[in-house]
Amino acid sequence: MTNCPECGVPETLCKTRFDEFLVLEFTDASYGIVHHLTVSAYMLQHSSKLTKEGWLFERDFLKEFLVDNKPPAFISKQNKDIVDSGKRKFKIKSRDGLPIINKTTWTKTILDVHTENAEVYCADVTAWARSVLEDAQVLEV
C-alpha cells in the first residue's frame, strides 16, 4: 500500500474523501457551512495543485477564517477582485504539478473528519483546518 506523497494518507483516500465531502457540502447546507475550510485545508495539504502564490493565498485565506474570525461572505466580497481569474495578478493553480512544500506528515488529515452528522462533520473539518493552518504557518515556502 502506498501513501499520498503530500498528505501521507494511504493510497488515494484523500482524493476520494475530498470528493465525497464536496458532494455532502453541495447537497446538504448543514454540511456546506464549512466548505471554505474543507477546500483550503485540502489544498494546503496538496500543494502540487497550487502555485507558490496560490498556496500562500490559501494559507492567508484560512487564517482570515480561523484566526481573524471573518465570515466567508465578508472574505468573498473583500477578495472579489483578487480571486477573479480575469483580474487576479497571480495564478492559483499549478500547471507543473510539483509540490510547493515538502511536508508529508500533518497533525491531522482528511481521514480525521467524520461524516455521521453535520454537527460532528463541521467540528471535525474546523479542527482539521485549524491543525493544517498551525502546521502550515511554520513552513518555509
Image: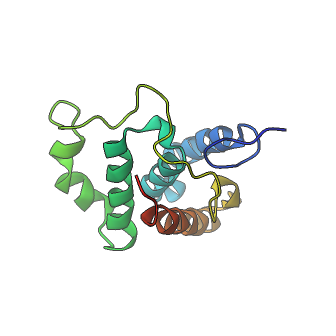
Q: Is residue 140 left or right of residue 79?
A: right
Q: Position of residue 44 (x, y in %)?
A: 48, 50
Q: Who is closer to the viewer here, 54 or 65?
A: 54
Q: Position of residue 114 (x, y in %)?
A: 69, 60
Quarter of the image where one finds residue 73:
bottom left
Q: Is residue 21 left or right of residue 55?
A: right
Q: Position of residue 104 (x, y in %)?
A: 63, 51
Q: Who is closer to the viewer here, 9 or 126?
A: 9
Instruction: Give the total number of marks visible in the rendering.
Output: 0
Residue at (14, 35) in percent of width and height: 87
Residue at (38, 57) in percent of width and height: 59
135, above or below 58, in the image: below
Residue at (63, 65) in percent of width and height: 107
Residue at (42, 57) in percent of width and height: 140
Q: Who is closer to the viewer here, 123 or 85?
A: 85
Q: Position of residue 21 (x, y in %)?
A: 59, 47
Quarter of the image for the N terminus: give it: top right
38, above or below 1, in the image: below
Q: Who is closer to the viewer here, 28 or 68?
A: 68
Quarter of the image where one finds residue 62:
bottom left
User: Outermost residue toward the top?
Assistant: 95
36, above or below 71, in the image: above
Q: Is residue 32 left or right of residue 86?
A: right
